[in-house]
Amino acid sequence: MNESQNKEYKINWRDEYLKWIAGFANASGGKIYIGLDDTGKAVGLTNVHKLMEDIPNKIVNYLGIIADVNLLQTDNRPYIEINVSPSGVPISYKGAYHYRSGSTKQELKGSALQQFILKRLGRTWDDLPCENATFSDIDSDALSYFFKKAASSKRLTTDIEKSDLKTAFENLNLLTNGNKLKNAALLLFGKKPSKFFPSVSFKIGRFITGDDDLRYQDVIEGNILQMADKVMDILKTKYLFSPIIYEGLQRIEKLEVPEMALREVIFNAIIHKDYTGAPIQLSVYNHKLILWNEGRLPDDFTIETLLGKHPSRPFNKNVADIFFKAGFIEAWGRGIAKITNGFKNEGLKIPVFETTMGGILVTIDRPNYNLKDRDTNDVPDDVTDNVTDNVTDKVVDKVADKVPDKVPDKVPDKVPDNLTENQQKILKLVAQNKTVSMSEIAENIGISKRKVLDNINKLKNRGLIERIGSPKGGHWKIIN
């Protein structure tokens, strides 16, 4: 018999093996055998009767638990079996906490220890009081946003909105028994959650040739309830592609990856994140998206469990409850199924889920990246490294005002044949309407204003188009 999650062999007894007993008690229980070698073969004990008295006493005195200690024998070689039951409370040995994981014993420290103790007490980190936080730290706009979503989802009565702030938070289970705001309250509705939790942010970076080629990035901050909307807005505006298709006379702009499935991925990252760790990170490459958030699966879960039918076991139960009441998620552990089905229904490869670097990593393919009318990824310096709470076009508008009016002295005799499809569409729109705005061009073609600006700069540098007058009050002129 080999050693396993619930079985450990030792040739002789040492008091330090009380750590292993504590590890079994803190996990799912197990048995430790004294007098067996690593293969499970009995080697015998010479002081077995003394050990049968000492071991039970030491377990009680050092660990405060009772274990069954049995004397067994094989081929006249006695050995001892210590049967340890799982404990409902954390068990320490000389102030240290140990845990049995696989066939190894680990000492719990830092965040892992905190999460372990909270779990044993039936609580999660977001359930703890946020010291020094008051109702003045709550954003009323965020609360109104929630009530509107909750009313729309019909998962919350409208009466709660009419309550005073303290009563409303009590009814939402966001106050402790001592009337302190819970960590979840500041995460969900705080004016500035990063004041209390520095890692409450969502980082997005655009990489081109490799991990060392970061062209531009955004950091989305603020409360986590509205974070998903902000992330999706900036992804659709700046990072992802929405090809235009027509069904009859209807013009449809469809995101390159299933939008609802992508939103579910983002919800999962926000809800199940360990907010004592690093920020959520989304890396956008030419042919894939990689999202990583620090957080752990439930102890008895694997990736296979996650991809199959499973119960809902949220890492942050209070956060998950508010997201459910707002209508953002279901309470049946169906989030992963919605993600995989969303991609399957579009005939796309389902995302790959992995546990790595203390968190969950999700890889999503971008199969349509190489569509004929995709532009290059050169980005003006003015729109790099933005930190934003609200996704708008202000940065692009600022860059648009700086487009140079000067054109090259030498003008080509004819339009080159190697223009992209978007550049050809821009020339056609300018020819039809010399005062057409960048916003109108972007809307008509179905690309972002930044990409319009990028293409206009290229057309001007090639001597094909010219701006007459100011950026605001002037007009376009086609050279050839």
Image (tube, rainbow, N blue to C red):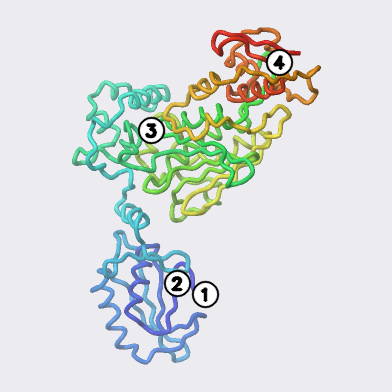
Residue 242, percent across and down? Answer: 63, 26
Marks 1 and 3, how far apart in space?
A: 51 Å
**Residue type, label 1:** Asn
Label 3, label 4: how far apart the Cα atoms are: 41 Å
Q: Amino acid at mark 4?
A: Leu
Please name which of the two marks, 3 or 4, marks the residue nearer to the observer. 4
- Residue on which disc 2 sits: 7
Q: Which quadrant of the view contains residue 79? A: bottom left
Helix or strand or loop: what does disc 4 sit on?
helix
C-alpha span from label 2 to label 4: 74 Å
* Residue that mark 3 sits on: 222
- Mark earlier in primary sequence (3, 4): 3
Q: Earlier in the sequence, mark 4 or mark 1?
A: 1
At label 1, counting other C-alpha atoms closer than 10 Å, the crowd grade (few under 14, some 14-19, many 20 or more) is few
Residue 246 x %, y %: 69, 18
Could you say whether the residue bearing mark 3 is in a helix, strand or loop? loop
Residue at the outermost left position:
178
Picture residue at 67% right of the left edge, 32% below the top = 376
Residue under numbered circle 4: 427
Mark 3 Cα within 10 Å, few/some/many (few <14, many 20+)? Answer: many
Query: Residue 187 at x, y = what percent?
Result: 34, 37
Q: Are marks 2 and 1 in contact (CB under 8 Å)?
A: yes
- Which mark lies nearer to you, 4 or 1? 4
Question: What percent of the width, then of the height, locates residue 81?
Answer: 39, 78
Q: Amino acid at mark 3?
A: Gly
Judged left or right of residue 152, residue 427 is right
Count neighbours of disc 2 (C-alpha within 10 A) and say few if under 14, some if 14 to 19, many if 20 or more.
some
Q: Are marks 2 and 4 in contact (CB under 8 Å)?
A: no
Specify which label sits upstream in the sequence, 1 or 3. 1
At 60% from the left and 20% from the top, the residue drawn is 404
